[in-house]
Image (cartoon, rainbow, N blue to C red):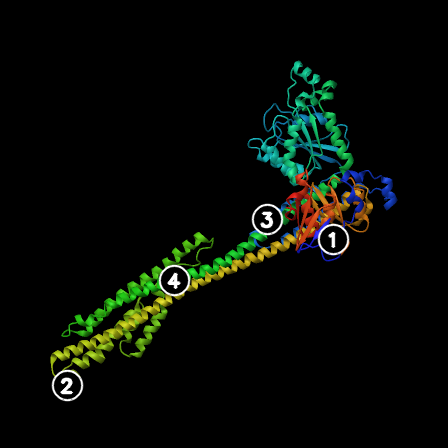
Amino acid sequence: MRLEGLDGAPQPEGNGDVSTTPRHPIRAAAKGPAASTEVSTMMRVQMYGEEGPLPDRPQVLARLGSAASATALAAVEVIRSITSSEVASLCRATTAELEEGLLRIRGADAQVRVALMGRTMAGKSTLFEALTGGDGSRIGEGAQRTTRETSERPIQALPGVVLVDTPGVGAKDGHEDRLLAFEAMLGCDVVLWVAANDSTQRETAEALVSIADVGKPLIVAMNCRQGIGTEAKRRRLLRDPQRPFRDLEGHVARLQAFLEPLGVRPGAVVAVHALAAFEGAKGDPELLSVSGLESLRSAVKDDVDAVGPQRQALTVADACRGPLSDAVESFRRVADELHDLSQLKVRAAAEYLVRMTRALASAQAEGALLVETRIAAGRDWHLRADLDGDLNKQMHEHHGQVAKAVESALEEADQDMCEALTDEQGLFADDWTLPPLRDQQHVAFDDAGAWGNRAAKLATRASFGLATALIVMSNPVGWVTAAVALGGILVDRTVVQPATKKGGWIDRVLPSRQQKVLLLREQVSAANRESLDQIRHSALEALEHRRQEYLKLVEANHRAQEAEAEGRLATASASAASALNLQSLVRQLDAETAGAVLALAGRGRGSAAVRECVRQPGRAMAVGMEGPAADEEALFPSTVPEPLHPFPAEAPVPSARRALHVIAAVYPPPYHAVLRGACLTVALEADDWPGRRERVQQLATGASGLQVMLHELAAHPSRG
């Protein structure tokens, strides 16, 4: 075995995560697990000494139950510390599942429980009656959903083993039946799956995958549904009992196709004729002998005798481990999603501010252009004024018309700014999922206190006209009217009257009336421009003020979005921390479980040496053990329900060496390994069990903390 570093050259021993020598030379040289089982128990005793007395099974299970309960209660405290409403439903669901697990632990007894499951109409209830010596009361008449509730009875000739009949899966409108069946299965130690020999349907595949996901071991009863209602059919079965199962291998292959990618294989597959078994159990020994019932009973007995107590220990642990493991994955997923959403929200909020500000500026520019247009229309008024008439009155009327036009322009501009925000918000919502603009509404000019103050100052500057200015301040556009009134008064008092009165300065300076008229129009034009400029300046200030008011709303909404992003980021951090805490509890429970399983297998030294464990329920466990216990377990594997891959738990042990120990327990060297950074790539010979490679890859990753990738040797990049 050769381990390469980043540059492809072999790395020296003792350098970080580099290892080239397996710790178990005898085990590594053996060609598979079978070689180690040939070594006698006497050799193990000579090498490692006698084991102590076997532990008391109830005591071990009770201790494990206490550990699992304590783990569940600690997990509930971790979950309750999360106060975010975004994960409240997840917290409630996880807490409820943990509470259900605690109830299953407290209700556990010393009996091994076998869940009888299968598709509807597969013959489960018939087999249930045959195995338990029933009277046939639960057998249906070929209709779906005959069994609608669970029932349990002891299996005949198997003391301490209880068979639990469950509703069938796959029936039309049978969702509740499926939930009831799987709920009952979680409290059992073994699953006896009844498969009909006439079909293997999609519901069967989905159910088997679900069972494998929770780690329950499988025994498959392939039931023949050939009728024996007549004497001729009975004789045909007795004459050739193997004929109904001529395609057994094909059905078994299809079942294994569902399970092997998950790293799971049935413990046993037994051909059985459930109806013949039931009829034979009632007093027909010939039918009983060909029914396969005794073979099925023996398969259950062999499993219970070999690892029954260990399976009970796994059931106790999994009552809380299952919800905990699901919660870890859920909180990790939520943390990742909230983190990504938070980053997205920050970018969206920044773009939101830019787009809304740009929309306001554009609407303001259009409003300013409209104001300029309305004012420009009144700048040539001096050419139309009747100089022989009352100029003061004419100017008041003219400026009043301009004021109305400007007032209308400002109202249009205000409405345009509001609509611009609304339209941009709609376009923005098409691109981003954002809350509506907070407090967005049309802001009328009747709250224009600033404009009233400004007009009041103008009125105060000119002591005359104060009453007029105060009156018009109450109107929506009082500032415009005030400016018009004050402008007219100023023009009348300072320009028109002194210039046009008899003996005025025009009569004294200009010799002719025509010249007087020209000069007067120039003076009126200048006064008109000055007044209109005042109106224009005040209107543009009003427009800018309205833009600032809307911008305050936009900025408030922007801050709210940033605060929401910060809140989600905080929730993401809390969820990630909770996932780590829950994962630590899972590891502690797995270590307790491994110790209990080894103790029940009679390996007291190994049980005491367990320090850590990475477990895949129903598939395998990688166990870190102190001292020579890891070597002993590697050389002389114990009989446990889940394949156990030992690795040394002494510190410091490089991560790569941990991973290689786990791999070497399943795939003997030599193989090619390359370590690049935190990724360990190992090329193996082809494996005829594809699910096993994925299983070992996950175990090695969990035990080492590296990203372990297993490939077939021919597919490895360095080998072409």
The residue identified by callout 4 is 360
The residue identified by callout 2 is 508
Q: CA distance from mark 1 to mark 3?
A: 42 Å
Mark earlier in primary sequence (2, 1):
1
Residue 124: quarter of image: top right
Q: Nearer the viewer, mark 1 or mark 4?
A: 1
Give the camera-side residue of 319 and 77.
Answer: 319
Give the camera-side residue of 90 and 297.
Answer: 297
Give the camera-side residue of 219 and 538.
Answer: 219
Residue 50: percent from left, percent from top: 87, 44
Mark earlier in primary sequence (3, 4):
3
The amino acid type, in three-letter code, at marker 2 is Arg
Residue 280: percent from left, percent from top: 72, 20
Q: CA distance from mark 2 to mark 3?
A: 96 Å
Check the image and report above or below for 308 versus 514: above
Residue 168: quarter of image: top right
The residue identified by callout 3 is 90
The residue identified by callout 1 is 19
